């Protein structure tokens, strides 16, 4: 890398929101980039942007750092061998399409192709095998959106260690950075002047598919975290009658404390924004139908398949789905009865503080769900995931970045085999102090008719884990009654199965 020849260090394929910005980030870190997109306007746009930034910020550099290519054969001819190619195309069929085009263009078996999109992790496992004779298929999930890609994303690489050893220096250079002492992001959004100091937010995650799985769960947590903030907004707005701008003020205050996060900050910015067309708060003009591209759904599906409770993540996916049924909601809002939604004569300041505690507790609960899910899948797949390292690389660059992740890092550094974050003393103590406020927030939402599916499902998760005895004993009785499905007894060794002769003499049979 950083070669002395006229050849380029890395090829970037797909120059949309992420690819263009990753290419500019790589160029800022002194690697020379060959760039290609099916859309030649995007190639030209990337080349022009590099030129503009170079002329504005890096006057001493005269040679273009990004070369626009007309096709993949041209790109391959311009790259140092063995070649490194970064794919930033939409997940699904386009990844396979780009890989096949690279084979057709003459890619060689020791070249490396890195899928940086939000691919389904099982597709990644399958692709590594499928292309084994054609090239080294590697994957690196990326989080951080447009700005992260440009100035430092969180990177979750997985697959062949040979490929990782080759690309690691580039990845460390382009990743977001964290101050090792404080755990806080070191941010600078200046073209030509990337952050070089601090700990890079990238670590080798494990075998093929593991990085995409970890990114998928990151997105599941992202869905839940976003929905929690939205529920707090509805409670403050419809419940307490605060304007969007007043809610933004509350969020800005919360951002100074344990709820500090990028999502809290951008939510305050969205709520403060006026609509350029009408002057009304923009949030009141945006249609309340949420989109989704699939990663939250995959997380919920995976949790169901593996039997790991992640109800708050699943509720966040359902909340988006329900939001899209606007016509039904309009009809039922006239038809179904319930309270008025206004919280009436309550101590507003006290409620805001209770809600802050509730949000903190619900957030711990949904991170506990996400980390437990990764742990269960890792066990199933034989991956050795390092959860302290995973929490570390989420402290900056990614969408769920928050100071809170420093506490998660410390919890896993103290006990790397922690089965559930709720067991970590720092969190269990904080939850014990705040849980009563959480209950007030949930019951207030329920009694006022304001839906808070994630805040309340997170509490049910917490309370379920607090229950030494659950009514699953009755459930086992029901199953045995109608289907002779058998049950274990509390006074007999695990694994011994019994059936009661419900339709006959009610005798107990050891099966
Ligand atoms: N946007 C975001 O915030 C984030 C996105 N991601 C993931 O990163 C990936 C890229 O996302 P994003 O940049 O937003 O997507 P975009 O749609 O903005 O860009 C993808 C680009 O790839 C091009 N493309 C598609 N197929 C090929 C091909 N065979 N050869 C060359 N170019 C091709 C598309 O061209 P055309 O439009 O002409 O088809 C398009 O310009 C996705 O998997 C996404 O889920 C990950 C993290 C954050
Ligand atoms: O991966 C991301 C951030 O981490 C993307 O922003 C993701 O595409 C957002 O997902 P959705 O469109 O489903 O909200």
Image (cartoon, rainbow, N blue to C red):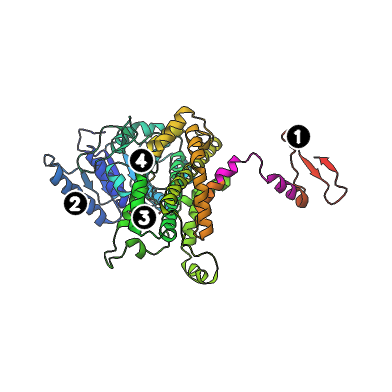
Pick whichever, 397 or 215, lies toward us: 397
* Residue 106 shows up from this direction: no
Which residue position is annotated with label 3?
247
Q: Secondary structure at mark 1?
A: loop
Which residue position is annotated with label 1?
491
Along the polypeptide, which appears first: circle 2 or circle 3?
A: 2
Give how far apart the Cα atoms at labels 3 and 1 are: 54 Å
> For the magenta stretch, what is the residue range?
461-479
Along the polypeptide, which appears first: circle 1 or circle 4?
A: 4
Give how far apart the Cα atoms at labels 3 and 4 are: 29 Å
**What residue lies at 44% left-to-right and 29% top-to-bottom?**
413
Give how far apart the Cα atoms at labels 2 and 1 are: 75 Å
Which residue position is annotated with label 4?
154
Ligand 1 closer than 8 Å to the CB at disc 2?
no
Q: Nearer the viewer, mark 3 or mark 1?
A: 3
Q: Considering only vertical position in the picture, is 179 above or below 458? A: above
Pick whichever, 91 or 278, lies toward us: 278
* Residue 90 shows up from this direction: yes
Give how far apart the Cα atoms at labels 1 and 4 are: 50 Å
Along the polypeptide, which appears first: circle 2 or circle 1?
A: 2
Q: Position of residue 378 (x, y in %)?
A: 52, 36
Q: Position of residue 251 (x, y in %)?
A: 36, 50
**What residue lies at 27% left-to-right and 45% top-to-bottom?**
150
What is the crowding at mark 1: few (fewer than 14 residues within 10 Å), some, or many (at least 20)? few
Along the polypeptide, which appears first: circle 2 or circle 4?
A: 2
Q: Secondary structure at mark 2?
A: helix
What is the crowding at mark 4: few (fewer than 14 residues within 10 Å), some, or many (at least 20)? many
């Amino acid at each position: 890398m950083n070669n002395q020849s006229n050849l380029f260090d890395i090829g970037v394929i797909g120059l949309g929101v992420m690819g263009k910005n990753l290419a500019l980030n790589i160029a800022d870190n002194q690697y020379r980039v060959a760039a290609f997109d099916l859309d030649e306007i995007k190639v030209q746009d990337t080349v022009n942007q590099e030129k503009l930034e170079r002329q504005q910020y890096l006057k001493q550099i005269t040679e273009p750092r990004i070369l626009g290519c007309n096709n993949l054969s041209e790109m391959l001819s311009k790259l140092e061998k063995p070649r490194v190619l970064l794919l930033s195309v939409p997940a699904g069929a386009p990844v396979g399409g780009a890989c096949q085009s690279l084979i057709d263009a003459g890619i060689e078996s020791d070249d490396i192709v890195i899928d940086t999109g939000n691919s389904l992790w099982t597709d990644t496992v399958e692709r590594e095998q499928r292309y084994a004779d054609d090239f080294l298929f590697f994957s690196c999930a990326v989080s951080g959106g447009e700005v992260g890609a440009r100035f430092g994303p969180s990177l979750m690489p997985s697959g062949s260690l040979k490929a990782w050893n080759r690309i690691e220096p580039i990845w460390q250079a382009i990743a977001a950075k964290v101050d090792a002492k404080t755990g806080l992001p070191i941010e600078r959004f200046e073209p030509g002047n990337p952050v070089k100091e601090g700990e890079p937010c990238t670590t080798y995650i494990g075998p093929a598919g593991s990085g995409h799985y970890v990114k998928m769960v990151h997105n599941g947590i992202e869905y839940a975290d976003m929905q929690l903030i939205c529920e707090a907004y509805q409670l403050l707005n419809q419940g307490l009658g605060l304007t969007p701008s007043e809610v933004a003020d509350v969020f800005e205050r919360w951002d100074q404390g344990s709820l500090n996060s990028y999502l809290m900050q951008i939510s305050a910015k969205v709520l403060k924004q006026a609509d350029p067309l009408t002057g009304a708060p923009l949030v009141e003009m945006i249609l309340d139908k949420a989109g989704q591209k699939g990663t939250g759904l995959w997380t919920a599906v995976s949790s169901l398949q593996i039997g790991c409770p992640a109800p708050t993540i699943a509720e966040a996916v359902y909340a988006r789905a329900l939001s899209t049924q606007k016509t039904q909601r309009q009809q039922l809002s006239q038809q179904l009865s319930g309270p008025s939604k206004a919280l009436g004569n309550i101590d507003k300041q006290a409620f805001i503080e209770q809600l802050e505690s509730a949000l903190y507790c619900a957030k711990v609960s949904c991170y506990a769900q996400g980390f437990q899910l990764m742990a269960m899948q890792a066990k199933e797949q034989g991956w050795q995931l390092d959860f302290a390292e995973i929490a570390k690389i989420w402290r900056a660059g990614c969408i769920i970045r928050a100071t809170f992740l420093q506490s998660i890092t410390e919890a896993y550094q103290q006990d790397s085999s922690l089965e559930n974050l709720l067991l970590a003393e720092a969190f269990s103590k904080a939850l014990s102090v705040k849980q009563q406020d959480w209950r007030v927030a949930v019951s207030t939402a329920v009694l006022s008719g304001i839906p808070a599916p994630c805040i309340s499902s997170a509490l049910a998760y917490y309370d379920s884990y607090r229950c030494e005895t659950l009514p699953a004993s009755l459930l086992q009785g029901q199953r045995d009654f109608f289907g002779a499905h058998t049950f274990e007894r509390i006074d007999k060794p695990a694994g011994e199965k019994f059936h009661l002769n419900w339709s006959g003499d009610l005798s107990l049979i050891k099966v």
